[in-house]
Amino acid sequence: MKKIDKCIKWQIFLKILPLTGLFLLSKYEIHLVNIEIWSFDLLGAFLLGATTFLIAFALNNTIADYRYSESLPLEVSNILESINDTNLLVAILHSEYNSQPLKNALIIFGKELLEALETNMPLESVINNINFLNHFLLI
């Protein structure tokens, strides 16, 4: 995972580097021709620095969101397994409890969530399944 992060950082750097070079080269050419629209004073340096900082801040947050979203399916899977383990434990401790309906509902929920994430479809059916699961979890 760290290798992927380094690759992403280098990809971003290599995409931004030509744009920065193009900006500096165009600024130098405008300076040579003496048609400066905007002088590069402290205010210009401040604006360039502030813009660079804001872009870096936004890119850093995007990469952090990406890292968080990578672990999300694993966390959902662990939660579903934990609910199922608790369901089976209750079935062992209470012989009159039927664990199969909740197990089936968890399987359906997991499949629909996976399908919704893979196809980018709206999550309405997943939300309906969560409401359906609430009925089993409150009993």
Image: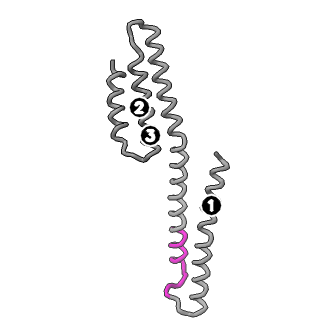
Classified by dominant secondary structure, the portion drawn in magenta counts as: helix
Mark 1 vs mark 2, foreground winner is 2
Q: Are marks 1 and 3 in contact (CB under 8 Å)?
A: no
- Going by the numbered disc 1, the residue's amino acid type is Gln
**Span of residues in magenta:** 37-50
Q: Amino acid at mark 2?
A: Phe
**Left or right placement of residue 51 versus residue 14 in this view:** left
Q: Amino acid at mark 3?
A: Glu
Considering only vertical position in the picture, is 112 above or below 39? above
Q: Residue at (45%, 43%) from the top-left corner?
A: 117
The residue shown at (41%, 31%) is 109
Q: Residue 11 bears which disc, if any? A: 1
Q: Which residue is mark 2?
A: 109
Percent across and percent down for residue 105 are 39, 26
Dot 3: element: helix
Give the CA separation, mark 1 to mark 2. 37 Å
Dot 2: element: helix
Pointer 3 local density, CA inside 10 Å: few below 14, some 14–19, many at least 20:
some
Q: Is residue 103 magenta?
A: no
Q: Position of residue 104 (x, y in %)?
A: 41, 23
**Could you say where residue 128 lies in the image, as x and y percent from the top left?**
32, 34
Q: Is residue 99 left or right of residue 23?
A: left
Of the numbered discs 2 and 3, the one sitting upstream in the chain is 2
Q: Which residue is mark 3?
A: 115
Above or below for 85 versus 96 = below
On whether residue 43 falls in the magenta region, the answer is: yes
- Residue at 63% x, 65% y is 14
Q: How far apart are the two marked residues, 2 and 3, measured between alpha carbons?
A: 10 Å
